[in-house]
Image (cartoon, helix red, strand yellow):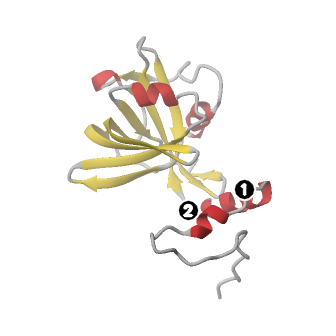
Amino acid sequence: MMPALAPLPYATQACNDSGQDDAARAISHDGAARRALRDALGQFATGVTIVTAADADGQPVGVTINAFTSVSLAPPLLLWCLARSSGSLAVLRAAPCHAINVLGSGQLALCQRFAARSGDRFAGVDCRPGPCGTVLIDGTLAHFICRHRSVRVVGDHVIFVVEVVAYGSTPGAPLVFHAGGFAGS
């Protein structure tokens, strides 16, 4: 038997004629409602990736991402999102290409390192240069070399739709993020 649903933290309204949901604008943005929404979204398990590129001086830049999905096979398109407040955003937006490195179950420390807001994320990390100025992290389950197809600011994030120009993979168990924690590590 399913548990009862929690009351919604906003007044429900029907969609208007334009197809936009008026209720979406009515969601409370206070701390408790925001936490409840994060908890609900956290019930969807995701894989974990690190997006990497080189800046204009050739220095590597990377950040942990879990908002990542396949969009299309023909052409091969992926989507990933990054907070507008990210210190890596300007470089990743300006780079002609970037790599998406898919983390394996034993790479929690790597995930946490690239999620940190400060420090040298690449210190002691085995990586190599990839095509088009990208940075490939050794030991990951897969990597995708991508170029921007569409970049759009939506809410507090930037959505990147990217075209895969090269890729590689190896079998293994993934690092999974679920309910605010990690599985597979």
* Other-residue count near label 2 (Cα within 10 Å), few / some / many at <14 / 14–19 / ≥20: few
Q: Position of residue 58 (x, y in %)?
A: 41, 13
> Is residue 24 something one can see in this rendering?
yes
Q: Secondary structure at mark 2?
A: loop
Q: Which residue occupies the extreme left position in the image?
A: 74
Q: Position of residue 92 (x, y in %)?
A: 44, 29
Q: Which residue corresponds to the image point at 56% horizontal and 78% vertical from the top-left?
A: 14
> Is residue 137 something one can see in this rendering?
no
Q: Is residue 86 left or right of residue 94?
A: right
Query: Which mark is nearer the camera, 1 or 2?
Result: 1
Q: What amino acid is found at the position of numbered circle 2 in the picture?
A: Phe
Residue picked out by circle 2: 44
Q: What amino acid is found at the position of numbered circle 1 in the picture?
A: His
Q: Which residue corresponds to the image point at 73% horizontal and 57% vertical from the top-left?
A: 35
Q: Is residue 43 left or right of residue 92?
A: right
Disc 1/disc 2 C-alpha distance (Å): 21 Å
Q: Position of residue 178 (x, y in %)?
A: 60, 57
Residue picked out by circle 1: 29
